[in-house]
Image (tube, helix red, strand yellow):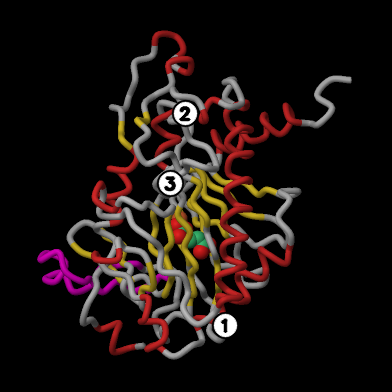
């Protein structure tokens, strides 16, 4: 019997999804519901704690951008200005004992006052690392490479142990009244925009449109609040509705480089249009090792195609993104909390 485990079939499906859409769902991933649901339940409980408790693990440059960020601290940058994303979150990364090599290296600030939350979050991270390594093996196979390509030197020596993973525990309250209508994202306040400051778009977003930075994102979202939107090839926003028991996955910027543009990360955003309920999601980013040099894979440069991308050190790409993600300190958002 050929392909008894169906791995070739899955590899082909992954190839088609990465090439044509950039998003796919995974099921049969092996993570128990007590972990995937439990981490969201504990997160919801934690975000309901008073602000002064949450601020005990506040994120700033001295905490290597790890920890809690209040509502509106995370921003999306557009030409000429930024808009505040309407969420609060806890950011955690792979821990590094030597913090000197990068502004994002250091230890995590685990959620305060909640050992149960920390315990399930650690289980969740460990489960996602296994899933990430397994899916990357499938993606390598779908590309016609050795299934452990990404674990090899040419593939960045990335595995569950070395991945510079990130996880974001995110709480999206309902959008502010009068800002939820879809369409009409005209930029008002152009004098602010010209100065590179905060811009007042007609529509508020829970998370502005972006692509992810690394290899693979695994999204664990509330089952009953559709909010993640993906831009399709026609330029329309399509909802990636939650399917219980599955994770939504998408590929990031490094996959475009490795495949010399054959796979392109897809723009996505979050709009919690529910006026009465907040949404929790816990995306996990299975990323390249920090020092990995990412370059178009020679075996994928068919027909003497030239590489379209210069090699990138993943950690430098990550730093440039993280350092511009926040508008911390006294803000309109602080007043709104
Ligand atoms: O909350 C979600 O569904 C996805 C969030 C996201 O795209 C991100 O954090 O990069
Ligand atoms: Fe994302």
Q: Is mark 3 within 8 Å of ligand 1?
A: no
- The circle drawn on residue 45 is 1
Magenta stretch containing residue 298, yes or no?
A: no
Q: Which residue is mark 2?
A: 262
**Furthest-front residue in view?**
97
The percent coordinates of residue 95 (x first, y second) are: 41, 54
Q: Which residue is mark 3?
A: 164
Kindly identify the residue that appears in the image at 52 percent across and 30 percent down.
151
* Vertical side of 106 occupied by 277: above or below: below
Circle 2 residues within 10 Å: few <14, some 14–19, many ≥20: some
Q: Quadrant of the C terminus?
A: bottom left
* Vertical side of 60 occupied by 210: above or below: above
* Secondary structure under the numbered disc 3 in the rendered image: loop
Q: Cβ–Cβ below 8 Å for labels 3 and 2?
A: no
Q: Nearer the viewer, residue 226 or 25?
A: 25
Circle 1 residues within 10 Å: few <14, some 14–19, many ≥20: few
């Amino acid at each position: 019997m050929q392909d008894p485990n169906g791995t070739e079939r899955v590899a082909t499906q992954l190839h088609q999804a990465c090439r044509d859409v950039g998003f796919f769902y995974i099921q049969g991933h092996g993570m128990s519901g007590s972990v995937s649901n439990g981490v969201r339940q504990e997160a919801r409980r934690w975000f309901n704690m008073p602000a002064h408790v949450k601020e005990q693990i506040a994120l700033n440059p001295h905490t290597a951008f790890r920890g809690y960020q209040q509502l509106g601290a995370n921003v999306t940058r557009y030409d000429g200005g930024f808009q505040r994303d309407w969420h609060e979150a806890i950011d955690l990364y792979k821990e590094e004992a030597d913090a000197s090599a990068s502004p994002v290296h250091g230890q995590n600030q685990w959620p305060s006052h909640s050992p149960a939350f920390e315990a399930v979050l650690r289980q969740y991270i460990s489960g996602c690392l296994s899933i990430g390594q397994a899916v990357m093996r499938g993606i390598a196979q779908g590309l016609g490479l050795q299934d452990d390509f990404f674990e090899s030197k040419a593939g960045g020596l990335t595995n569950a142990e070395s991945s510079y993973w990130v996880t974001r525990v995110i709480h999206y309250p309902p959008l502010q009244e009068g800002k939820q209508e879809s369409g009409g994202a005209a930029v008002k306040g152009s004098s602010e925009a010209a100065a590179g400051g905060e811009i007042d778009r007609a529509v508020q977003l829970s998370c502005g449109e972006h692509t992810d930075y690394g290899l693979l994102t695994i999204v664990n979202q509330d089952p009953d609040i559709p909010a993640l939107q993906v831009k399709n090839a026609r330029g329309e926003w399509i909802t990636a509705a939650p399917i219980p028991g599955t994770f939504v996955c998408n590929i990031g910027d490094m996959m475009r480089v490795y495949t010399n543009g054959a796979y392109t990360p897809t723009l996505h955003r979050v709009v919690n249009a529910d006026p009465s309920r907040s949404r929790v999601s816990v995306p996990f980013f299975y990323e390249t090792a920090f020092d990995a040099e990412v370059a178009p894979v020679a075996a994928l440069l068919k027909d003497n195609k030239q590489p379209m991308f210069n090699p990138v050190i993943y950690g430098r790409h990550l730093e440039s993104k993280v350092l511009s993600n926040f508008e911390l300190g006294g803000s309109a958002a602080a007043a709104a909390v």
